[in-house]
Structure formats: C-alpha cells, structure tokens
Amino acid sequence: MRASTLLNAVLELLGVRVGKAAVCDAELRLTVSLRRRRLGCPQCSFTTRHRYDTREVDSSWRHLDMGGRVCRILLRRRRLRCPQHGVLAEGVPFARPGSRHTRDFEDLVAWLVTKTDKTTVSDFARVSWRTVGAICERVAADVLDPGRLSGLVDIGVDEISWRKHHRYLTLVSDHDTGTIVWGKPGKDTDTLHAFFDELPDAGASIEAVSMDMGPAYARAVRERAPEAAICFDPFHVVQLATNALETVRRRVWQAARALPDQRIAKTFKGARWALLKNPADLTDTQAETLREMRRTGGILWRAYQLKETLREVFAGDLDAATTGELLDRWCARAQHSRIPEFIKAGRTIRTHRAGIDAALDRGLSNGRHEGLNTKVRLLIRRAYGFHSAQAALALVLLACGPVTLELPYHTGGHPHS
C-alpha cells in the first residue's frame, strides 16, 4: 500500500486528500489538496469557481500528533474575491477561519483545558498558554448555539473576579438548565444592558431575575425588562448577616489587641471559621471555641446568634408566608440589638424586602448560580495566566455553558469514533 493511501485512510481529513508526506526537522509534514473545485470564503457562505490567484507559499496547520511527532498539514491555497470581504485566501473544511490548527487539534485542547491545569495542557499539546486562550475563543464561538438566548424565563445574574485589581465578568445563567448562557467583562449597568441587546425578544420572555442586592443589575432590569420580577435570593440575604458578623469579629479582635494579654486577641482571630461555618460542619476544636464564647457571652456571641437565626429562617423548610413573618421579627431584633453592623443589615433587608418576597414566592435562588461560580473560580485559578477577559470568558462558557465537549475521536461524526 502506498504511503499516501495509508495516510488518507488513517487521517480521513475532511475534504482533502494527502499527496505526499515527509519528515522534516523532526516533524511529520503532510502535503494535501482540496477535493472540491469551488473556492469558499472563510468568513461567509460565498463560493465561486473564479480564482483570483494562488498564494506563493504553503499554508500550514498543526494537527494531532502522530507517533509522538508534531504533525503539520500543508496546502497551497488559492485566493478569491468575496463581494463582502474582498480578496482573501479560501477557507478549508478541516480548520476554523483564522486558525493555524485543525479542528481536531483545537477540539482536543479545548476538552483538556476544561479538565486540567494550564501547565498540563501546554506541555501535552506543546503550545503556549496564549495559544490555548485563542483556541478557547475560537471553539466557544463555533460550538455555542446562537439560539441559546431564545425563550429564557428565569435567569440569574452575578459577577465574578477573573483577575486581580477588580477585573470582573458578568455572568448570566439559565435557572431551567443550570448553565451559564452569556457573559461579558465588567459588572455595571451598561454590562447587563449588553445582554438585553443580544436577546432576540428584547427580554419579553423573562419573568424573573435573581441577583445580589447591588443597584447596578437591578437598574438594568427595571429599564430593559420592567415586567420581570427582581428576586434577591436568600443566599445573599444570609450573606449580609455573615459579613456583619465578620466585621464585628474584626472590631472585637482589634480592641483585644490593645489588651496586655495577647492570648485574648489570638482567640478572637482564630474564631473566624468557627463563627462563619454552619454548626454541623464544625470541627471539635471549633465547637469548643463556640462553647467557650457562649459561656463568656458578649457582643460577638449575640452577633453569632443573629447570624444563625437568619440562616435558620431561610433553611428552606418553611412556606413563604411564615418565612416573611420570621424575617420581620429578625429585622426588628437586629435593629434593637445595639450592634451597628446588624442594625445596618436589618435596614438593608427592609429596603429590599419586595425582591426578597419575590424570591420566596417563586422559590427562586441563586444557589445553582453560586455553585457555577465555585466551578468558575476553580477554572480561573487553574487557568491563571490568561491575559484576556475574552479568553477567560470563553473557557467559562465551554466548561459551564450549554455545550458538551468531546474528544475528537469520540464524536459521532469522526471516522474513528
């Protein structure tokens, strides 16, 4: 069997035939030709038989390694004149427009980067991390369904930091599917306006939006989807009390540092996780710390009780009416506690009461979105080194979006699947 015949049978690259093969500079280089006669624009669906000219050098694409060697596909491409995009080299069926890698290679890298860290991906694929980011952007643009924003009903909106120095991504999730369907760098009102700009029905189908109690997202929803219910989910309500408790602990710790006995200050500093964790998750040492704090009493113990009481209000085993009644009692208790942080928390809850009631009535929570955020934080930590918000966002959509990535030889249309 001729080498070219064997390579055609093994590779089965879409739309091409292998002409010759050679090993050069430790790389396997395969020269191929297109089976089709018509030239296709890589940017649109325009095709023509008229050739503008032929490039003087071969184009090359990195393919999946063969026998441990880097494999490159070489093709002398023709150029065409597209009425919309002008003169440019013809598109090829085995690679995405503008890419120097085949679809199979990019699909492999995209699958790997959602499973493991950047060093492993870079070493395995023998590409730079910047190249990995560009591959993620191309694959995400290709595999994400453009109709994924149609018919959204209940959505969640939240921001997440993708890099230090206050660099954020705004992410929108679909409560029905539990996936992230949209994202954009930034976390202000204009950022969420961009989401509504892309909705095919201008937000008419959206009935409820869950979010935190920041004003930016709520303002955008009121302006662009005034009929949608704004829901402040219980997670962020309880987070108000948690943050207030941590502020009280730090204030008590700072005061204790001025005392002659520094052991007291160390006790309050080490009590952070004992105070913030749920009682069922405490270690024996943390449980003993809480018992000692209960015996001594004081402002920190009263703050802890307020936090735990609010958490129990939203435990999920009560109906909306009972939860609302208990929430009113908690706000009254907080505002009479003489603890400034909890007085402020009670005032904030009363200000946002309509949104909290809407979340209770609908049973809508950002819990699934927060779970996605946990996964996103892990991805971003593993992908440390992305210098582009678009690359980080593409990775998030590939891993948490409404897509199913598979290895190239596991897909149904692949000849070796």
Image (cartoon, rainbow, N blue to C red):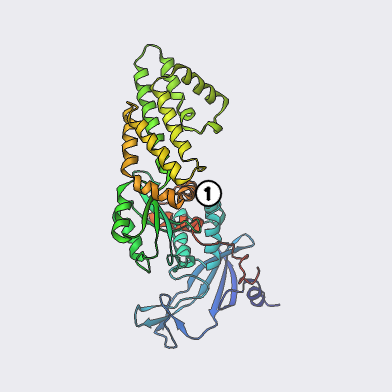
* Nearest the eye: 138 or 271: 271
Q: Residue at coordinates 33% horizontally, 45% vertically from top-left?
A: 352
* Nearest the eye: 76 or 136: 136
Q: Picture quarter containing residue 155? A: bottom left
Q: Residue at coordinates 45% horizontally, 51% vertically from top-left?
A: 364
Q: Residue at coordinates 58% horizontally, 64% vertically from top-left?
A: 64
- Disc 1 target residue: 117
| Callout 1: SS | loop
| Vertical side of 354 occupied by 36: above or below | below
* Nearest the eye: 392 or 233: 233
Q: Name the spot of residue 105 as percent of width and height, x first.
A: 54, 64
Query: On the rendered structure, is 250 left or right of 29?
Result: left
- Farthest-out residue, bottom: 49
Residue type pointed to by label 1: Asp
* Nearest the eye: 317 or 154: 317
Q: Residue at coordinates 40% horizontally, 12% vertically from top-left?
A: 261
Q: Is residue 160 visible?
A: no
| Vertical side of 297 occupied by 217: above or below | below
Total numbered badges shown on the rendered structure: 1
- Farthest-out residue, right: 1
Image quarter in which the C terminus is found: bottom right
| Vertical side of 353 occupied by 397: above or below | below
Q: Name the spot of residue 97 as percent of width and height, x first.
A: 44, 71
Q: Name the spot of residue 353 as percent of width and height, x first.
A: 35, 44
Q: Name the spot of residue 235 as percent of width and height, x first.
A: 44, 43
| Vertical side of 182 occupied by 284: above or below | above
Q: Is residue 349 visible?
A: yes
